[in-house]
Image (spheres, grey):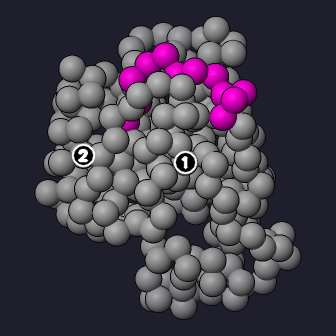
Amino acid sequence: MKILAFPYAFGSANIYFEFRNTLGSRFDLQSFDYPGHGIRLGEDTITSISGLADDALKQIIGLINEPYCLMGYSMGGLVVFELYKKLKARNLPLPKHIFMLGTCEPSRKFQKGDFENYDLEGVKDILRKRNGTSEEILAEDELIELIAPGVKADSIALRDYSCDADSSIAIECGATVVRGSREKDTNKCHKEWEKYLHRSIDYHTVEGDHFFLFKEGEKMRAQISDIVSAAVN
C-alpha cells in the first residue's frame, strides 16, 4: 500500500526517513517537498494551504491509480485535508485512509504576525517557538537565510488558513488523528475534526510533545506503525 506523505511546516520530505524504515515492506511511503523546501529549495514558495494542496495534487497525480493513503504531519495534515477535498471535487481516485499526525483541528487559530517582513532574527524566533530546531542550527546564519523564505511562507499559510465546517466535503474514507499527550490545547481536537470531516474518526493520544514521532525514538515509531497497520486492515 502506498502512503503519500507531506511534512510539517518548515520541514522537508526527509523527516519520514526513519519512519519509512519502521513501516517495513508492507507499505511504500513516499514523501514530498513543498516548493522552497528540501530538494525544491530554489523554487518560489507558496503562502496558502490551498495552494500547497494544489501543488501536492500535481505531485501525486501519477501515483493514485492504485490503492493509496495520505499522511500529513502538523501543517501537512491540513494540506492533506485540503488535498482530499480537491481530489473529491475532481472525481479523482480517493485514498483508502488519511492520517493526520500532530495536526490541529481546522478551526484552530494560528500565530499572528507580519511574517512577510520578518528579518533573520524574526525567522529564528519563529523556529525557536516551534521547539523543533536546536540552538546549534539557529546559530548558523547562512543556513537560516536559505530556509527563511520557506519559514515565512509556511507561517503566512497557517496564519491565513480558515475553513468552514458547514461547507467542508464529507470524508468518505477512514481517518485517523494522532496527537501528543504534551501538546497544548488539544481538548477540542477530536470533536472538531469529526465536525469538519463529517464522520467519526480514530483518535489516538500518544506519549510526547508535538514532535512525538521524531523525539520519542523507535518505540514511538513502532506504535504509530501499528496504528497505521490496524487502520488499513
Q: Which dot marks residue 181?
A: none
Q: Is the residue under label 1 in contact with that under label 2 (CB below 8 Å)? A: no
Q: Residue 186's spot in the image, x, y percent?
A: 44, 58
Q: Is residue 81 magenta?
A: no
Q: Residue 184's spot in the image, x, y percent?
A: 45, 68
Task: State which quadrant residue 52 falls in.
Answer: top right
**Magenta-drawn segment:** 165-176
Viewport quadrant of the C terminus: top left
Q: Residue 217's spot in the image, x, y percent?
A: 20, 63
- Residue 47 visible in image: yes
Task: State which quadrant residue 132 falls in.
Answer: bottom left
Q: Nearer the viewer, residue 229 or 164?
A: 164
For label 1, the SS is loop
State how far apart marks 2 and 1 are (Cα). 19 Å
What's the residue type where badge 2 is placed? Ile
Residue located at (31% from left, 63% from top): 181
The residue at which mark 2 appears reads as 224
Q: Which of 200 and 74 is in front in this view?
A: 200
The residue at which mark 1 appears reads as 105
Q: In this view, does 224 lie to the left or right of 147?
A: left
- Residue 153 visible in image: no
Residue located at (78% from left, 73% from top): 113
Viewport quadrant of the N terminus: top left
Q: Does the magenta stretch include residue 172?
A: yes
What's the residue type where badge 1 is placed? Glu
Q: Residue 32's spot in the image, x, y percent?
A: 52, 42
Residue located at (31% from left, 30% from top): 28
Task: State which quadrant residue 61 falls in.
Answer: top right
